[in-house]
Amino acid sequence: MDKLSEPIYHAWFAGVCKQWHLIAKDYNKKKKALPMLLLSLNNDHKTRRVLYGITEGKIFKNINLEVFYARRCCGFSHGWLATVDENMAITLLNPFNKSASRITLPSLKHRKRIKIPQFNVLKVVLSHNPTSSQDNYAVVVIYAPSDWLAFINPTQQHAWTYLDENLTGFTDIAFYGGLAYAVGRLGMVVSFDVNSKNYSSSQLLRPNIIVPGGCHTTFRYAERVYIVESMKGDLLVVRRFFKRRERFLEEIEEEEEERKNVTESFKVHKLLLNDQTKGSLEEHVEVKSLGDVALFVGDSQSMSILASNFPGCQPNSIYFTDDSIDVFAIKNTYRPKGPSDMGVYCLENGTFQKHYTPEYKHRYLAPPLWVVPPLQ
């Protein structure tokens, strides 16, 4: 099993017989699985997608997952994908478990929205796996048009709890120490308890503000900011900075607008919180090296793994996908631009490598995102 670099090989290994299944289960018990890319390709299966392994650079076309082919997924968390429809209703589905029923959540508030419904929800993050924690999981979302926050406990609530709408511009969510944390473009970091009984769905919740937006010169504006728990148990804030460039593909149709931004660099900071409350900031420290850790960011829940567990995985690096909401119109039909801005960023020397380069003909398809095949 040490020689099986891609996580899907571990799943195949476990499927040989009961004895091999037990071996694989024990082998992966204390190991986080390596994320894979969920891709849409031009084929005859318009409701299915395939997986791409980053260590071998291989597309597994013999694995077809029943997922919406053309619709953007607004998150992958604890084994479940999330999509949103034109009525702002979110659907959760488990692409690796056909027996798991889809979960349809109540519609979010209807506001002035952007032109493509699939971009009305920026991100969806779950506190637990609904399969193993049917009565104890929460769903937190960032929704349009101002990237507000809302959450729901589907088995306990019939409506969303909305957070203070004066707080906007959020880009990522993480669960840490029993609380939900969210980060925004201007450096704001907030926390809130999704399990508190004191919340009312009829009132806007004021979260605990750990870092006010715009108050720290260290946290300058970043279009994308991520928050993730490291392998050491630290809470990391990852800021992604962009630069302008004239052309992002060699071939650009006359009717298309050009992609103006591409990733320039990343900065990582560690938040040192009060040990007692986890609700106040003691200090924030820039992280110059991640050591043996690799981070995975994008439309999915942000993740960290030990690179040394996976041959071919780059340590001290950030693997990123194209999660920019960037659209253009052709004959009154709105389409996403890209995905073109994907790669691996080395924190040590600031260099980039490619992990997957989509073909030009795939530029109108749903953008790839990180998923984690279950190894247990």
Image (cartoon, rainbow, N blue to C red):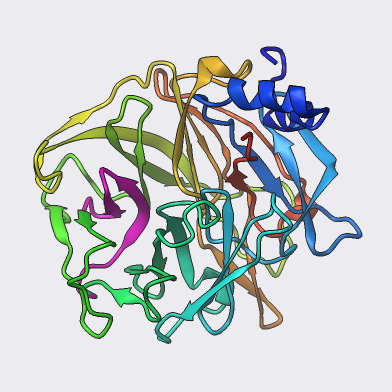
Q: Indicate whether 245 appears above or below 7.
A: below
Residue 206, given in percent of the width and then of the height, sits at 16, 69
Query: Which residue shows up at 83% across the image and 64% down it?
Result: 46
**Quadrant hosting residue 370:** top right
Image quarter where the N terminus lies is: top right
Query: Which of these two is toward me, 237 or 206?
Result: 206
**Quadrant hosting residue 68:** bottom right
- The residues colored magenta run 165-189
Query: Which residue shows up at 27% across the image and 48% down it?
Result: 178
Q: In the image, is 210 to the left or to the right of 225? A: left
Judge whether residue 212 can be spotted in this image.
Answer: no
Query: Which residue shows up at 62% across the image and 63% down it?
Result: 72
Query: Which of these two is toward me, 315 or 28?
Result: 28
Residue 183, given in percent of the width and then of the height, sits at 29, 52
In this view, which residue lies farthest toward the right? Answer: 44
Q: Indicate whether 3 appears above or below 296.
A: above
Image quarter where the C terminus lies is: top right
Query: Which residue shows up at 23% across the image and 46% down it?
Result: 220
Judge whether residue 244 can be spotted in this image.
Answer: yes
Residue 208, given in percent of the width and then of the height, sits at 14, 58
